[in-house]
Amino acid sequence: MKTLTHIKKTLFQTTLFTAILFSISSCTTEQPAENTKVIATDHNEMKFNNTTKEADAQFLVNAAEISLTEIQLGQLAQQKSKMKDIKDLGKMMEEAHQTSFNKLTALAYKKNITIPTSLTDNALVAYKKLTDVLEVDFDKEYSNMMVEGHREAITEFDKASIESKDSDIKDWATSTVLSLHTHLDYAIACQKKYDIKK
């Protein structure tokens, strides 16, 4: 009887100790990750006190966020869609934006500008939104996101191609906006095909 009581007591203490350890480890490891876009922006603000350079730096930060998002969503489209044209759109996005991001990384390094190198909070929100979409709605939602995202990107790149005083950044923005128009045209074609709502 004493042995049984002792075993129960030991088991209870072990369980309690394990629970305490688990709660301690949860508290120390579950800290919210910092937004990589905010970190990059903060670094650039500390480096540059010139308004023009700050604007160029912010453009490259935003461009990095765009490419990182498109790469991730493009991979998801290739995995989740059953339609060839959506898979092709996803592949185009992944490959073109990976190439663009590689050029951007080299340009940012040359200009001593910090850019995000992993998904930003906005990118994670977009990814979660798309992963949560029902399979039947995926193609429509992905097409809509690509159209909206590329329209916004074109506006941003057009602005930089006109307003930037840095010839390298200006040239990169001008050349990149051409491929963004190609992506937009393809995305609009998909949107018209799959946006059968209302």
Image (spheres, helix red, strand yellow):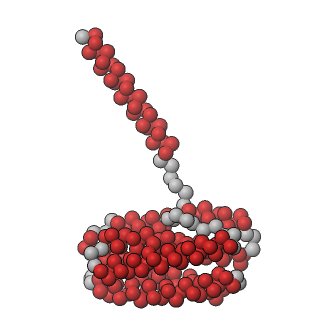
Q: Eyeballing the image, is 25 above or below 180?
A: above
Look at 56% across and 73% down and name the residue there: 102
Quarter location, residue 113: bottom right
The picture places residue 44, in percent across and down from the top left corner, at 67, 67
Look at 45% across and 72% down and name the residue there: 71
* Figure quadrant of the C terminus: bottom left
Towards the viewer: 113 or 127: 113
* Figure quadrant of the N terminus: top left
Quarter location, residue 115: bottom right
Q: Eyeballing the image, is 144 above or below 119?
A: below
How many numbered marks have been drawn onto this rendered protein structure? 0
38 relative to 46 in the view: left or right: left
Quarter location, residue 138: bottom left
* Residue 96 seen by the camera: yes
Look at 49% across and 70% down and name the residue there: 68
The picture places residue 110, in percent across and down from the top left corner, at 68, 73
The picture places residue 171, in percent across and down from the top left corner, at 63, 86
Look at 47% across and 47% down and name the residue there: 30
